[in-house]
Amino acid sequence: MSRLHKILFTGPMGVGKTTCIGALSEIPPVTTEAVNTDQETAAKATTTVALDYGELTLEGEEKVRLVATPGQLRFDFMWSILAKGALGVIVLIDNSLADPLGDLQTYLGHFSEFARGSRMVVGVTRTETHAVPTVESYYQYLSGLGLSLPVLSVDVRRRSDALMLIDVLLSELVYAQAP
Ligand SMILES: Nc1nc2c(ncn2[C@@H]2O[C@H](COP(=O)(O)OP(=O)(O)O)[C@@H](O)[C@H]2O)c(=O)[nH]1
Ligand SMILES: [Mg+2]
């Protein structure tokens, strides 16, 4: 399996990274959960401290490694290590949090190489309960930063939505590599 075939998932704690890899992976996902000591940010019993790992076979028998970053910002030193050699980054944003566009800005900053190289897709979760910011306002926000990235409203508990994120990222990569 080539090192190049890695897709990285990132986004705030509780957004759905572990769920997304679980929905996609053909192997039992490897996840490193620990007792959540940050109940204020997300009321979950456990949280991912190191990473999630899964595998998915694409058309043409190519395998991709699915890797998620830990959500808590105090583990952000891990992000660049995990991003090394990744084909692209899927940023999940939780629309129910206080400042979803601010969250997006954080991940755009940390993964700016991917954002500028059009090797990034934004998936917005919990739009069924939190309709704003709208997908349109995400596009406007990105456009204000000179970025043109796909933004999709997703519920990553559904495998079809999770697969859509992968498909859109892969078509972006093909387009980015076209002469
Ligand atoms: N409404 C909604 N809930 C979600 C979605 N994705 C995940 N969840 C729920 O959010 C919780 C946290 O998800 P998790 O995958 O652990 O988040 P992580 O911290 O990013 O890994 C779980 O209870 C999921 O069932 C989504 O797209 N929409
Ligand atoms: Mg997790």
Image (tube, rainbow, N blue to C red):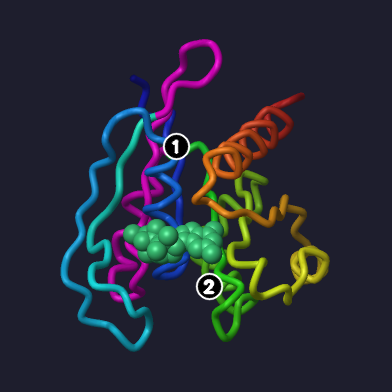
- Vertical position of residue 125 compared to residue 32: above or below: below
Q: How many marks?
A: 2
Does the magenta run of residues contain 65?
yes
Whether label 2 touches label 1, CB < 8 Å: no
Q: Is residue 36 left or right of residue 55?
A: left
Q: Is residue 58 magenta?
A: yes
Give x and y (percent) for residue 65: 38, 33
Label 1 crowding class (10 Å Cα cut-off): few <14, some 14-19, many 20+? Answer: many
Asked which quadrant contains residue 146, the reply is bottom right
Mark 2 highlights which residue?
A: 106
Q: Which residues are magenta?
A: 56-85
The Cα atoms of the two marked residues, 2 and 1, are separated by 25 Å
Residue 4: tell me if it is visible: no
Q: Quadrant of the C terminus?
A: top right
Name the mark on residue 24: 1
Taking 163 as reference, is 8 left or right? left
Horizontally, residue 49 falls left or right of residue 21, namely left
Point 69% across, 31% down: residue: 171
Q: Is residue 163 above or below residue 33?
A: above
Marks 2 and 1, the one that precedes in the sequence: 1
Coordinates of residue 153 in the picture (x, y in percent) = 68, 57
Q: Amino acid at mark 2?
A: Thr
Residue at image point 83% right, 65% down:
136
Horizontal relation, residue 173 to residue 179: left or right? left
- Residue 109 at x, y percent in the picture: 55, 68
